[in-house]
Amino acid sequence: MGGRKYCIVAIATLCFGACGNRQSTPTTEQQSIVVTNIQTVAVSNAKLKGGLCDTLHFGKMRQGEIIRKQLRIQNESDNPMVILRHITSCGCTTVNYDRRPIAAGESTTIDFEFNSRGEVGWQMKLMEFYFAEKDTPLKIYIEAEVE
């Protein structure tokens, strides 16, 4: 039992040590830029039924850069809304959001990350967010120019 405990501690030490080394010596290909302006999309039952989409403009970036943006989802319906799932068109985009219901009149923030590694030229990526009891997804496009 004591050897097993030592093994777990050793693995944890290696993992945390390796993560610390990567963070302390970033290369230009791993450079991240955090963009602070937050767009808001007002979501309601009627807007989702008619088809709702918006675009996050990431602007010009160098190949290998990672840019993060946020999008605020404002619930303009009379009922809580729940994002059940999302689909991305490319592995170069990641999405993080709170899975809790968005109360009527409240908002939540979705974090987007676009990794331009291996991308060149004009990029348009699609993410679809599916809400409970709604047939039509909210479509969010990411647009960027990778140099």
Image (tube, helix red, strand yellow):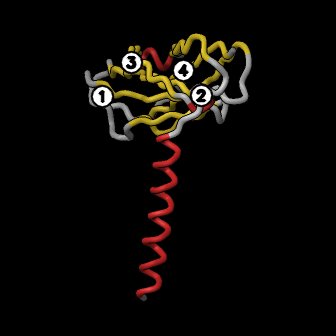
Q: Earlier in the sequence, mark 4 or mark 1?
A: 1
Label 1, residues with CA under 10 Å away: few <14, some 14-19, many ≥20: some
Q: Residue at x 54, y 20 (%)?
A: 140
Q: Is residue 112 above or below residue 12?
A: above
Q: Is residue 39 left or right of residue 50?
A: left
Is residue 1 at all visible to an observer of this figure? Answer: yes
Foreground: disc 2 or disc 4: 2
Residue type at mark 1? Answer: Asn
Q: Are marks 2 and 4 in contact (CB under 8 Å)?
A: no
Q: Residue at x 60, y 16 (%)?
A: 61
Label 4, residues with CA under 10 Å away: few <14, some 14-19, many ≥20: some
Q: Secondary structure at mark 3?
A: strand
Residue type at mark 4? Answer: Ile
Residue type at mark 2? Answer: Thr
Residue matched to label 4:
140
CA separation, marks 2 and 1?
A: 46 Å
Q: Is residue 123 left or right of residue 24?
A: right
Residue matched to label 2:
28
